[in-house]
Image (spheres, rainbow, N blue to C red):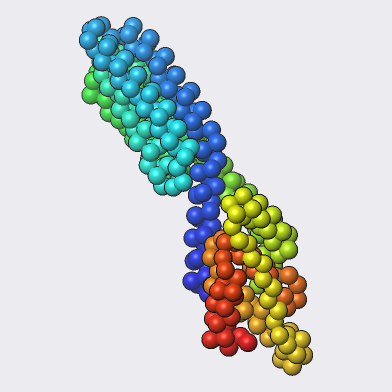
Amino acid sequence: MKAEEISAQGEDLHANYSAYKLRTAQSYIYMLAIVVSVLNLLLIVFDISCIETQTVRLITAAVRYVYSALLILVGGGLTRTSDYREYVISVSIIELGFLAINLFVLSQYSTPNFLIHSMGIIAIILFIFLVPNRRDVQLSLAIVAAMSFYAYCFIKLKDNSISDIMISIAYSAMSIIICAISTSINDKNRLREFVAKNRLEQMSTTDFLTNTANRFRLEEEADRWMSFCRRQKLPLCLAFVDVDNLKQINDTFGHAAGDSVLITLSRLMQSQLRNSDTIARWGGDEFVLLLPNVSIKKRIRSIRTSCIQNQCF
């Protein structure tokens, strides 16, 4: 196999796995957004008890209300996106916003309790690793969250002893390390499961020689397109392609030459088909083309012309 083909397969696997992770995340990201927004609103009660100025209380409550509403809105939008990169960027911005809000609220407390807020930063770290995202982004966000919090503590909370801050840093670092290792292991296991499932699915629906669809997949595609074309009142064409003199080629040049003819022919036909078309190996030297919403004469003429130009017939 050529290096270009291996690279293309790797890119396809990465793209398919990203799409798989996006679908998995979308199955519960909206519910997670609702839960986090409710918890964010509940923190208003704690904010009011720790902030003395009425104006700052109102500002803090308004900020949390706006963030919760935005969180639900973005969470709903993420269930409809089809771009994993867009999902990662949106989730990362939301998490950075949550961190910024909590640091802002902490700066408004009259007498902040270092122990309670140390537990809070660990909870934020756990929250970052809980939300589906890329592993490197999760780790980066967790480190930024911890560094921001402890930088604030060194600057503003000077009444706390250095030993207490260092112990808190150690616990936070342990939380980051444990979560990062756990996320890495889970992601690798999920990738193995996805590859195995994808390979099994491909083996069950693909002809091993020509890499075209087999009969099982052709029947599935035919059922799907017949229902669709019947509803939309569109034409649906089924064409049979028979390779002439394949037995003679096998007898004269060997079965390897015959296999090469089948592979070359299938690739040529695949290059002429659209994404909606299906080519399947029916058996031996026969192929079947499933062509929804297309003129059969025009499509077959195009394929035959390409094959003649490449000396397949």
Give how far across and how far down residue 26 sits, in percent. 51, 38
Seen in the picture, residue 135 relative to 172 is either above or below; the reply is below
Residue at left offset 54%, top offset 81%? 306
Give how far across and how far down residue 2 sits, in percent. 53, 74
Left or right position of 247 against 72: right
Residue at left offset 75%, top offset 90%? 248
Seen in the picture, residue 55 relative to 139 is either above or below; the reply is above
Give how far across and how far down residue 79 sits, in percent. 48, 37
Give how far across and how far down residue 92 sits, in percent. 38, 37
Residue at left offset 57%, top offset 68%? 295
Q: Would residue 7 be visible to someone looking at this image? A: yes
Left or right position of 296 against 135: right
From the viewer's side, name the closer residue of 205 and 219: 219
Q: How many marks?
A: 0
Is the N terminus in the top left, top right, bottom left or bottom right quadrant? bottom right
Residue at left offset 30%, top offset 20%? 63
Seen in the picture, residue 291 relative to 92 is either above or below; the reply is below
Is the C terminus in the top left, top right, bottom left or bottom right quadrant? bottom right
Farthest bottom residue? Answer: 252
Q: Would residue 177 be visible to someone looking at this image? A: no
Farthest front residue? Answer: 233
Q: Quadrant of residue 59?
A: top left
From the viewer's side, name the closer residue of 64 and 96: 64
Seen in the picture, residue 13 relative to 102 is either above or below; the reply is below
Q: Quadrant of residue 222?
A: bottom right
